[in-house]
Amino acid sequence: MKEQKAQEQPVVVQGAMSVETAELIGAMTETAEEPWGPWRIVRGRLFGHPLVISETQWGMANAAALAAIAIERYHPAALISQGTAGAHDDALNVYDIVLGAQTVNESAWQSHYRPAGAGAPYDDLKKLGVFAWDAEKGEFTQEVEHAADAGLLAAARRAVPRYTRGKVVEGVIGTCDSWNCAIDRVKFLRTFYGSLCEEMEGDAVAQICQSLGVPFLTIRIISNSILHNQDPWDLGTGPACQGFVMEVLKEWWARGEA
């Protein structure tokens, strides 16, 4: 029954921009445009399996809203948030891929009281996290990190040997509606949150997926690194990431995981 369920339900894959979705859409058959408001959603089949591509545009609010709509509309077996990211770890270079074993909202923090003139240092913060539904506790709980689905992460690991454009690592992916170009700020985020890279969608989508019981994984390719003067970002990374995501989907469908 588990395998049959995975075959019948689509996987939803999100990307913020056309450079992060066009390869996947181009590889699909039996495609149908099914927009929601001004956002593009394309349904079709990939390798014979149902797939939905959601082009969210930048930002946590957009991505979370489109995740909720896709879950309500398509009842997916899984949801993958994928696309480009800026490096926080100086061991990463453009075209390296990060599998989000965890995601974290890097804007969810509280500053401690300091009087006027005392400054607002980065290191004087408390991690807050965000609220998502905890099915075991039967209540909304505040969590700093959201863990990836074990089955999706395993499928991604099996796909790693077929990726040849760079290395693939696992760790924390940071999400925030910001683009950090100050090296000291990037180093702070790396130390404070343990994040390998930053993007603008993944943890917000993880929050919705956890609350609605949908398996989730975020995958990001390094498109730029301020730490190595690799900026502006490399547009070729979007298609490369989608190629890897296709290999992940092959592995997911081959095992019938859901």
Image (cartoon, rainbow, N blue to C red):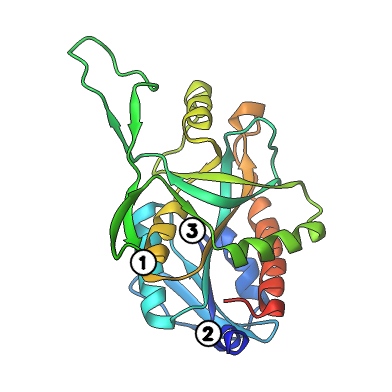
> Residue under circle 2?
9
Q: Secondary structure at mark 2?
A: loop
Instruction: Please state which amino acid type lies under the numbered disc 2.
Output: Gln
Nearer to the camera, 231 or 104: 104
Q: Secondary structure at mark 1?
A: loop
Going from the N terminus, do you reach mark 1 or mark 2 first?
Answer: 2
Q: Name the image quarter holding residue 231.
A: top right
Locate the C terminus and report the quarter of the image it occupies. Answer: bottom right
Q: Which dot, 1 or 2, sits closer to the camera?
A: 1
Q: Badge 3, how many Cα within 10 Å: few under 14, some, many 20+?
A: many
Q: Classify residue 65 as left or right of residue 12.
A: left
Q: Classify residue 250 as left or right of residue 187.
A: right
x, y (%) of residue 52? 52, 77
Vertical position of residue 237 compared to residue 181: above or below: below
Q: Which dot, 3 or 1, sits closer to the camera?
A: 1
Q: Secondary structure at mark 3?
A: loop
Going from the N terminus, do you reach mark 3 or mark 2 first?
Answer: 2
> Residue under circle 1?
135
Q: Residue at x 39, y 67 (%)?
A: 66
Q: Residue at x 41, y 63 (%)?
A: 210
Q: Which dot, 3 or 2, sits closer to the camera?
A: 2
> Residue under circle 3?
16
Instruction: Please state which amino acid type lies under the numbered disc 3.
Output: Ala
Of all residues, the one furthest to the left in this rendering is: 116
Gap between marks 1 and 2, in whole Å? 22 Å
x, y (%) of residue 13? 54, 68
x, y (%) of residue 71? 40, 75
Q: Residue at x 45, y 71 (%)?
A: 214
Q: Badge 2, how many Cα within 10 Å: few under 14, some, many 20+?
A: some
Instruction: Please state which amino acid type lies under the numbered disc 1.
Output: Ala
Q: Badge 1, how many Cα within 10 Å: few under 14, some, many 20+?
A: few
Going from the N terminus, do you reach mark 3 or mark 1 first?
Answer: 3
